[in-house]
Image (cartoon, rainbow, N blue to C red):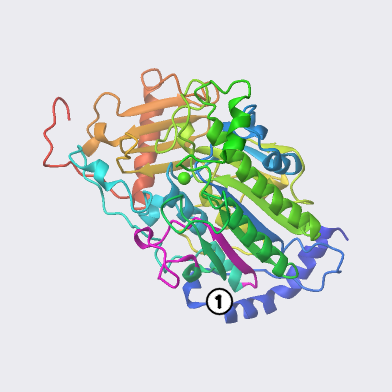
Amino acid sequence: MTFEQKAMAVRMVSSINEIRLVAAVMSRVLVGVAVVGGALSGWAADEPDRHRPNIVFILADDQGQHQLGCYGAEFYETPHIDRLAAEGMKFTDAYAACPVCSPTRASIMTGKYPARLHLTDYIPGSDAAAKDQKLQLPDWRKHLPQEEVTIAEVLKSVGYVTGHFGKWHLNHDKKYAPGRPGDPGSQGFDDVLTTEKPGAGPPSPYEDDAHHVREITEHALAFIETHRDRPFFCYLPHNSIHQPIAEREELIARYRSKPGSDRADHNPTVAAMAETLDAGVGRVLDKLDALGLSENTLVIYFSDNGCMWGPDVLKPLRGGKADLYEGGIRVPLLVRWPGVVAPGSMCDTPVTSIDFFPTLLECIGQKTSDSDVDGMSLLPLLRQEGTLKRDAIYWHYPHYHSLGVAPSGAIRKGRYKLIEWFEKSIDGVETPGAFELFDLASDPSEQRDLVHQRPDLARQLAHDLAEWRGHVKAQDMARNPGVRTVGGF
Ligand SMILES: [Ca+2]
């Protein structure tokens, strides 16, 4: 009997008892989540229980693909993160659900599009940037609602111990206080450390730890050590490499003297920050090795949005944080799971941060019946045993960002991507530049707008995008009556 057959047999036998057990332990916040299959017991001690893997989820802040060695970087050095690519799967077309922090984090926690949650900007948001603009900001949520079921709550309900160490960014108006509703502790996390970017909150207790990488790492190591004998979910949302850029001088000096340090996309301070972040990842991987846990631990490395450094021509993706060009939303994704994910494998299927919730559920033999969950389990891709039955991925960013980016939406369908600029398509009336269409297969840098060559395709994608907005009840942006407009607008 193969491992898979045995797992299936045990699941069938245990499913009835499991459903009873789970029904008993599901807390009231889990209404709407049905659990099927589930925890297994009776495995030989030397056999990893692949239906109860530990989960380590490392989230970088504002890190683009081009800043990792395993995605081709030569200036930036990330040997420990690269190890995850060598020992696991690298996704070339992984997307953040939003080009800024909080909405992507909400999508990871819930499996839902930020547009469905109406949590569409970073908290507390760039409301000031919207003053005197052509469109009015829609109502949007500045917290993750308590009634939303998070991945931590689901994992906790089936016996996982859950830890959150780092940047949460889903509180009411970003205020951190122990026990305050909306904190990680109220959303399913047992052991909680919250940190903020340098200058915004309490400093790290460690010297030369401006971005809390060491503080976050030390908490994670202690958590893993303490809970080595039971399934754990260790979520490490780092503050790095988000601005402000700052790092130890001796680390920066090494990159200043490195060839290519004069290139506009090669920032020695950011490179030094990336090295520190990478070293933290290395310590976590070393701890898993030392405790003999690597074999039965699913490790995910992801970034919440693209980076804001460097000109488009060099990165090579166009744009960056806050916009819906690829540089703002296409991010690194590495998944290591020995025995399930083939070492050194690659996947070019478009995937997005709404997929983590259903993926992790399926990895532990669970699934949700919440029809509002938008993501799809990536397990078939991880196993290299299938494809995703999904037509398109969507974005909705109805905000003016202080970096100078206007409100927009986007759809990626196959090789094509359409961006809609809401200021130019208001009330269904198009003005020039309302849409941009790109063929990402032949033009990943989005330099050739195909709207005029492929008007039918552009119209179809615009229709699909609008239909999706209706489906998830995305917020509309209304014309700002106080602002004079000219021409067709
Ligand atoms: Ca971010």
**Tally of numbered discs:** 1
- Residues shaded magenta: 158-184
Q: As rendered, which of 369 and 197 lies closer to the eye?
A: 197
Q: Where 6 falls versus 380 (above or below)?
A: below
Q: Would residue 151 be seen by someone viewing this image from the given angle?
A: yes
Residue 309 among those drawn in magenta: no
Residue 180 among those drawn in magenta: yes
Looking at the picture, how far across and down is residue 180, in whole percent?
Answer: 40, 71
Position of residue 4 in the picture relative to residue 428 (left or right): right
Q: As rendered, which of 369 and 482 lies closer to the eye?
A: 482
Q: Main secondary structure of the magenta part?
A: loop
Res 465 → quadrant:
top left
Q: Which residue is mark 1?
A: 26
Residue at the spot x=83%, y=59% of the render?
A: 3
Residue at the spot x=49%, y=23% of the render?
A: 264
Res 429 → quadrant:
top left
Q: Is mark 1 within 8 Å of ligand 1?
A: no
Mark 1 secondary-structure assignment: loop
Position of residue 80 in the picture relative to residue 165 (left or right): right
Q: Would residue 380 be seen by someone viewing this image from the given angle?
A: no
Looking at the picture, how far across and down is residue 122, in whole percent?
Answer: 38, 49
Amino acid type at image mark 1: Met
* Crowd around label 1: few <14 · some 14–19 · many ≥20 (10 Å): some
Q: Where 233 falls versus 486 (above or below)?
A: below
Q: Where 269 falls versus 38 (above or below)?
A: above
Quadrant of image for the N terminus: bottom right
Looking at the picture, how far across and down is residue 114, in whole percent?
Answer: 41, 51
Q: As rendered, which of 1 and 202 lies closer to the eye?
A: 202
Res 179 → quadrant:
bottom left
Q: As rendered, which of 129 and 3 lies closer to the eye?
A: 129
